[in-house]
Image: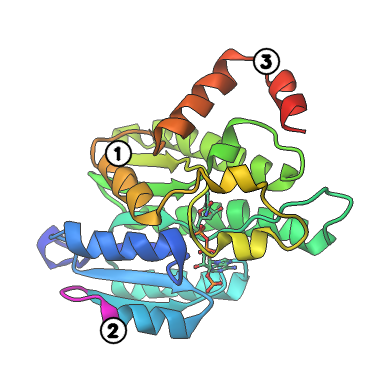
Amino acid sequence: MEDDVMSKIAVVTGASSGLGREFVVQISEKYKTIDEIWVIARRAERLYALEREIEGKKIIVLPLDITKQEDLEAYKKMLAKEHPWVRVLVNAAGYGIMGHVEDVVCEELTGMIDVNCKALVAMTKITLPYMKEQSNIINIASSAAYLPQPSFAVYAATKSMVRSFSKALNKELEDRDITVTAVCPGPVNTEFFDVAEKYSHTKAFKRLFRVEAKNVVKRALFDAYYLKTESTYSITMKAFKIVTKLLPNDWIVSMIK
Ligand SMILES: NC(=O)c1ccc[n+]([C@@H]2O[C@H](COP(=O)([O-])OP(=O)(O)OC[C@H]3O[C@@H](n4cnc5c(N)ncnc54)[C@H](OP(=O)(O)O)[C@@H]3O)[C@@H](O)[C@H]2O)c1
């Protein structure tokens, strides 16, 4: 199909709240050449509310659970039917649960791997045939990717995987001129903590470091535009990243514990 007749779209997972939702808002404002944004999450009513709010872009609501094979198949079929050019894929769906591995329910631990890793890889693999030069994949990792984290062990490990996967995939896709950016924010003010703090609470001082989703997303879109493979918002998180490179990780992990 010719480029000028293909619709150019963005696909955003985790679009019903927090960072994913903010990506939809900012992509609709900044990407003039994108015709449609496909918004994915389980809570359909939130997605339809977002559709009503966004002006000037067509929003396609896809109420999908991306850990379910049949829902991934539905997405695959939709791509095959519409045959769009996916200019931007944002993999923002994810969750974390704090607490010791011994204390958290097994399905909640493995569920983090299912959404944060397995579904992210599946979404990427299914979408890639519909991407072309000058397209972007934006994967939401976390500053938790920089270091093993006691009391957030599985979550931090999933985000290390996302960061590592993103960097390797970026190299693989270099010849196709597709950039993969791993976004590594510290704590962000979203509904993330409603789930994360089910078993254990964030220490009060850590709340001071929480930033707003709109700033993280603005930085991420800027970095993706300038073909950066990693996006870290805020001086504090940039400093944290440097510290994790300079100091022995085992020592920092002991300090965190
Ligand atoms: N907030 C932070 O402090 C922080 C820091 C670093 C990284 N992150 C990462 O940023 C990403 C977005 O988190 P957030 O802070 O925006 O949290 P959030 O407000 O809780 O958003 C999480 C999103 O993921 C979606 N989701 C979860 N499971 C899903 C599934 N099985 N299928 C489809 N969608 C699913 C949720 O939608 P439904 O429930 O409607 O399905 C929701 O839209 C996550 O990957 C998180 O790990 C967050």
Query: What residue type is disc 1 on?
Result: Asp
**Label at residue 248:** 3
In the displayed structure image, the side of residue 64 where residue 31 appears, left or right = left
User: Which image quadrant for residue 151?
Assistant: top right
Report the front residue among 210 and 55: 210
Report the front residue among 247 and 158: 247
- Please report the bounds of the magenta region as a residue range: 53-57
Q: Residues within 10 Å of mark 3 (few under 14, many from 20)?
A: few
The CA span between labels 1 and 2 is: 29 Å
User: Percent x, y for residue 30?
Assistant: 18, 57
Query: What residue type is disc 3 on?
Result: Pro
Tell me, yes or no, if residue 85 can be seen here: no
In the displayed structure image, the side of residue 169 where residue 83 appears, left or right = left
* Residue bearing mark 1: 223
Residue in the picture at 30% in, 74% down: 82
The CA span between labels 2 and 3 is: 50 Å
Please identify the quadrant where the C terminus is shown. Answer: top right
